[in-house]
Structure formats: C-alpha cells, structure tokens
Amino acid sequence: MRLLIDWAHRVRRTAMALVGWRTRGVKVMVFDANGALLLVRHRYGNSALWMLPGGGIGRGEPPVNAAIREVMEETGCAIAEVVALGAFEARIEGRRDTVHLFRATTSDAPVADGVELAEACFFGLDTLPDTTSPATMRRIAELIGQRAVTSEW
C-alpha cells in the first residue's frame, strides 16, 4: 500500500508542476494543554520529516473548515480555539501553493490515520525531532518571536 501511495504522490506532484496548477492548502499548529506541538510524519514523500498536520482545501471550502477537517481526518483530534496566523506562498517542486496557517488547541490524543500518516505525536518546543521540516521550524521560530514573519512558506 505504501508503494502505491508514494507513487500516486509523485505522479500528482509531477503533473501539478508541469501544468502549473496553483493549489491552496492548510497547516495547523495544534497545541495540547502543556504547550506541546502536534507533528506528523507522512508515509509518502520524505517520510523521515516531521511536519505540521494539514492538507488541501476543497472547492468552495473556507480554509478554517479545511484546517478542522484535515486535523480530524489525519489524527482524530478535534481542535478548538482556531486562529488564523497568515497565508504563505510556497514554490516547492515547481508548484505554486498558498498555505493558510492556523493555531489551535486540542485535548485529544493523536492517532495516525495509518494511510497518509505513519506517526502523529506531541513534542515540546524544546524537544522537537532532529528531522522536523525546515518550513515547520521557520513557523515555530516566527511564533515564538525568534524570527520575523515572512510571506514564503
């Protein structure tokens, strides 16, 4: 199953770059009561990287609704206190993406969906995995005031 998912991810990524489709997605900084941040590790792409949960925005779907839906689908966590932090432009792998970033809280324990995600765990901001994605590290540094907010993902 992992091979099929990885293959589909590569085909979609290549097609989007060739056609130049502009996509819209969401990422969510979900914190628990102790201030730990929810990170996920995907089964496709660079599966070693830990990153913020999120995904695509459906046609006509408000970004906040996509954020709530994606976190629930991927991790089983219901989120509350959802606040928009900004919209960022990503130009990775030849694509043009707009990423809407949100901050939220949850009291739920994450469970990786087993299809898209290999793992979903909370980490203290001082104990993040060495393989946390660079984009996630930039957003964390911006959130805690260690770096100025930029418009690029």
Image (cartoon, grey):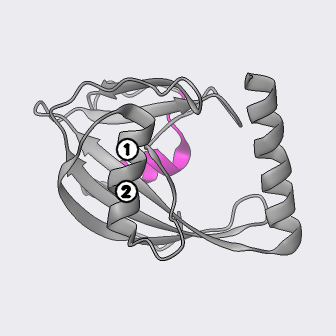
Q: Position of residue 106 (x, y in %)?
A: 19, 39
The residue wearing badge 1 is: 71
Q: Are marks 1 and 2 in contact (CB under 8 Å)?
A: yes
Q: Residues within 10 Å of mark 2 (few under 14, many from 20)?
A: many
Give amino acid for label 1.
Val
What amino acid is labelled 2 in the image? Ala
The answer to whether 116 is drawn above or below residue 152 in the figure is above
**Residue 59 falls in which quadrant of the image?**
bottom right
Report whether 94 appears left or right of 71: right
- Find residue 138 and report its horizontal and vertical position in percent: 44, 53
Which residue matches tag 2? 67
Q: Which quadrant holds the N terminus?
A: top right
Q: Residue at x 74, y 34 (%)?
A: 5
Is 136 situated left or right of 141 in this image?
right
In this view, 150 is above or below 147: below
Q: Which residues are magenta?
A: 131-140
Helix, strand or loop at mark 2: helix
Evaluate whether residue 101 shows in this view.
Answer: yes
**Residue sitting at x 82%, y 45%:** 10
The answer to if 137 sits in the magenta stretch is yes
The spot of residue 69 in percent (x, y) is 38, 51
How far is mark 1 from mark 2, CA to CA? 6 Å
Q: Residue at x 76, y 44 (%)?
A: 9
Instruction: Report the residue that reaches farthest toward the left.
Output: 33
Q: Against 41, is 90 above or below? A: below
Q: Nearer the viewer, residue 135 or 58?
A: 58
Against 25, residue 36 (above or below) is above
